[in-house]
Amino acid sequence: MRLIWFTLLCLSLAAPAVNAAAQTKPRVINVTTDSAPDWIPSEELEAEALSTLDRYFGAIDKGHDLSMWNLSTGGFKSLTTFAEFQSSRKTMRGNLGRLEKLSVLKITWSKDPARAPAKGIYAAIDISARFSKTKRHCGYVILFKANPTDPFSIARIENNYFTDKVAKKIAKDQ
């Protein structure tokens, strides 16, 4: 009788864990075909990449242009001056407004890809976002780390959006 009670107690305690596991989204890992053979990004590496993304969008929202600049790779910085970068971020913030929601749609990983400018780990993060003035934002951020001990840096950013004002005009005209 005690064995049956113990078994039932164990089953009743295990049930919530099984249900919780069924409700959690499985981790999806996308790795490019030209990545180092058999390499898989760890959960810690993914968390680090997402933390870098959060720091970047937090800096956008707060107007901390120097923080964003300092998160960038040398290659990214070579494409523009800090003054030009700062001016474009100010314009973008004026168009977007405050960040309301950021969604990560997909992360594509690569380690030491053949056609990349440098060996290392790359994370291409596809995003969509809602801002107070712009409900239609999508793009991607490519993060890079040359060595496992280095932090991620921003190698490339692609922002695509149109303001709510433009969306209303398109709806009216169409």
Image (spheres, rainbow, N blue to C red):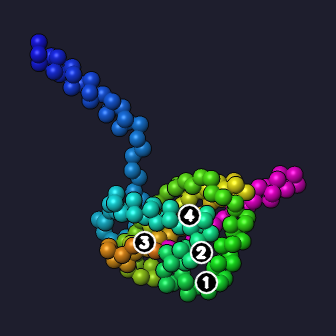
Which one is nearer the viewer's eye here, 126 or 80? 80
- Is the residue 84 above or below the residue 61 in the image? below
Dot 1 corresponds to which residue? Answer: 82
Marks 2, 3: nearer the viewer: 2
Label 4 sits on a secondary structure element that is helix
First in sequence, mark 4 or 3: give its number: 4
What segment is highlighted magenta in the picture?
A: 154-174
Which one is nearer the viewer's eye here, 47 or 60? 60
Dot 2 corresponds to which residue? Answer: 65
- Mark 3 packing: few (<14 Cα in 10 Å), some, or many (20+)? many
x and y percentages locating residue 128 in the rendered image:
60, 56
Q: Are marks 4 and 2 in contact (CB under 8 Å)?
A: no
The quadrant of the rendering that contains the N terminus is top left
Label 2 sits on a secondary structure element that is helix
Residue at figure coordinates x 62%, y 69% from the top left: 63
Residue at figure coordinates x 65%, y 84% from the top left: 83
Q: CA distance from mark 4 to mark 1?
A: 18 Å
First in sequence, mark 4 or 2: give its number: 4
Q: CA distance from mark 1 to mark 2?
A: 9 Å
x and y percentages locating residue 62 in the rendered image:
60, 65
Which label sits on residue 152?
3
Q: Are marks 1 and 2 in contact (CB under 8 Å)?
A: yes
First in sequence, mark 3 or 1: give its number: 1
Q: Amino acid at mark 1?
A: Phe
Dot 4 corresponds to which residue? Answer: 57
100 within the magenta span: no
